[in-house]
Structure formats: C-alpha cells, structure tokens
Amino acid sequence: MTATASQNGRIQVEGVRHIYKKGGTVALDGVDLEIGTGLFGLLGPNGAGKSTLMKILCTLIVPTDGKASVGGHDVVRERNAVRKQIGYLPQEFGAWRLHRVEEVIDTLALLSGLADKAVRKKRVREVLERVGLHDVLDRKVKKLSGGMVRRLGVAQALVHAPQVLIVDEPTVGLDPQERLRFRKLMAELSQERVILLSTHIVADLGSGCNDLALIDRGKVVFRGSPVKLVEGAKGKVFEAVLAVDGESKLAPGIEIVSRAREGVGIKIRGLAAGAEPPPGATMVAEPTLEEGYLAFMAERGRADAAAEGVAETEAEVAS
Ligand SMILES: Nc1ncnc2c1ncn2[C@@H]1O[C@H](COP(=O)(O)OP(=O)(O)OP(=O)(O)O)[C@@H](O)[C@H]1O
Ligand SMILES: [Mg+2]
C-alpha cells in the first residue's frame, strides 16, 4: 500500500473549535479525533456539536480554530479534494419532493461529473439497487416512506463512489424494521469505506460499529469501543418488579430505562447511578450499549453537580 492509499478516507481532527457568529454559541470546544476504517459512531445529546463537526468535515462550514483533514486533504485549503472523497447525508435531507427516485440520483450523478449517459444510468441503477430502492425508480419522492427517503439520501451520498460516508442522525423517525434495515446497510457499506454516523439512538450503531466517540457540549468525553462503554454500566443496571405506585418511591439517582406491565405491578429496568437499587432488584449481567451511554452521562452529570457543590449538600443530608 502506498502512503497515499493508506490515507484513504482517514479523518483527522486537531483542536477544532467552532463558535457560531449568530448567538455566539461555542458548538465545538477543542475536538481531537482520528478516525480510521469501518463504521465510526458519533454519540451525544442534542446540541452536543455532532452536526457541526460533520459539516466542518464536509467543508460546509469553516472551523473557527484548529484543523481537520479527510484522506490527508485539509478541509479548508483543499475543499474540492475533500468533497470528492465524501458523501454526505444531512440531518434534514428531504428535498426533491416532486421528482422521481431515479431522476434525483441521475441529476446528482451528473452534477458530480458523470457526463456519459449510459455509464451514469448503470451507476444510478447500481446505487439504487444497493440501498434497496430498485423497485421504486419511478416513484415520486413525496410518495416514499420515511425509511425510503433516508435510503435515497444514502444513494445520493454514494453516487460518486466516495471513500467516506458521513451520515447525520439517519434513523430518527424510522420504525424498528426500517432501523434494522438501515443498520444492516451501514454495516455492509462500512466494509469498503469509512462511515461516520451520528445518532442519539445508541442501539442504531449496531454490531458493525467497533469504535465511537461521545461528545458533550462541544468536547469529546469518551473515545473507545462499544464494549468499553458498556463496561462502565456493569453493576449499575438492574431489573425489579414494583407496585404500580412504586416508581415515585425510587431513590433519586435511579433512572428508568424501560418499563413493562407485569401482573398487578410494573417491571422496570433501571440504572442505579450513585444510588442503591430498590429492594428485591436483580442486577443485569450484560447491560446494553444504550445503558453504557446513560451510565456514562449520569456519571458526568454527577461530576458536574459535584463541581457546583450540589453533591456535597446531598451527602450532608444523607449522613
Ligand atoms: N447555524 C447555527 N447558528 C447558530 N447556532 C447554531 C447553528 N447550528 C447549531 N448551533 C448551535 O450549536 C450547538 C451545537 O449544535 P449541533 O447542531 O452541532 O448539535 P448536534 O449534536 O448535532 O445536536 P442534535 O442531536 O440536536 O442534532 C447548539 O447549541 C446549537 O444550538
Ligand atoms: Mg445534529
């Protein structure tokens, strides 16, 4: 492999800050990240800065400070080279409502430089087949389901065969079956390229993802494998059956992850972060990735509270 080939699709972010002029929000506050191959997850709550980072990598906005590159090309100085390497599915994809599926992708393929009509037609059919839209080539975009629109978004991002795919919250609003399908598509596509996928539906990263970063308030607060994130929730997730009014009696610091009716009571699955699980609870041996995420964020919340002196007051009350 040549030096250039090993740079294929590699994403490097160094000390990136971004302050939006409008409102003066510090959206990114010193982000360092190196992303290699496969499916990389970008997790974080609303407003964390995920979309901002993605837009910087796609050359849509210029960072206030720091540098970033894709495949060795600087996102500010070598925009065109970066754009050639990147396919982008924005968070709010949904334009082209009155056009037909094949027409949309054909037009975008033309814009990306595929001038030969026959070559283009073949390529357009290929990508639509790849995302499973070959049966609806003539359907208008406004008649597609939410999941199909998202897949059309992936097709448009793939049409120029980029080495990097950046997809921003692709599974929001999809039903469980479509989410599953999307997850599978991402796992398949990540065999051949780098995919950077942001989501706050943690489970949607799926088993195809081996590396992730969690960002919160503009900073990377966790970087590592999903397994490592799950580790942090071990010994904190429990299941318990409560009386119907039992929830209100739970200790503060317990977060309910899911609930279901059981007989006359309710069965809950909860996270005991800094609190004792309720009497009779059984600990869960294998927490989910979502629980790993929640446990991590709960820890952070408590660290913040401690910094503000809130935890000290709580401790005094408890003793
Ligand atoms: N165009 C903009 N002008 C001004 N402020 C913005 C703009 N876009 C985002 N922000 C602010 O920057 C911060 C980061 O926003 P960003 O959209 O990057 O977060 P996010 O992690 O993608 O959130 P979400 O999960 O809701 O999509 C937020 O406080 C947001 O309000
Ligand atoms: Mg966003």
Image (tube, helix red, strand yellow):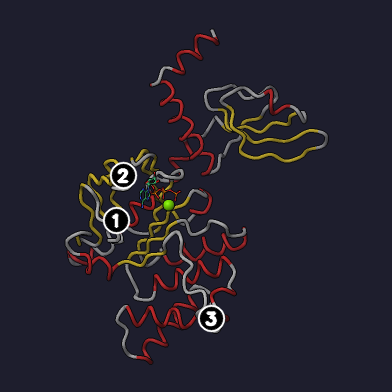
Q: Residues within 10 Å of mark 3 (few under 14, many from 20)?
A: some
Q: CA distance from mark 2 to mark 3?
A: 40 Å
Identity of the residue drawn at 52% across and 23% down:
274
Front-lying residue, 115 or 295: 115
Task: Compare marks 1 and 3 and give the one earlier in the sequence.
Answer: 1
* 59 sits left or right of 308 in the view: left
Identity of the residue drawn at 23% across and 48% down:
64
Which residue corresponds to mark 2? 28
* 275 sits left or right of 12 in the view: right
Identity of the residue drawn at 28% across and 68% down:
85
The amino acid type found where label 3 is placed reads His
Q: Secondary structure at mark 1?
A: helix
Rendered location of residue 7, percent (x, y): 23, 62
Query: On screen, 232 above or below 100?
Result: above
Rendered location of residue 164, percent (x, y): 33, 64
Q: Secondary structure at mark 2?
A: strand
**Which mark is on residue 134?**
3
Mark 1 touches mark 2? (CB < 8 Å): yes
Rendered location of residue 1, percent (x, y): 21, 67
The amino acid type found where label 2 is placed reads Leu
The amino acid type found where label 1 is placed reads Ile
Task: Compare marks 2 and 3 and give the one earlier in the sequence.
Answer: 2
In which quadrant is the C terminus drawn? top right
Q: Secondary structure at mark 3?
A: helix
Q: CA distance from mark 1 to mark 2?
A: 10 Å
Which residue corresponds to mark 1? 56
Query: On screen, 86 above or below 300?
Result: below
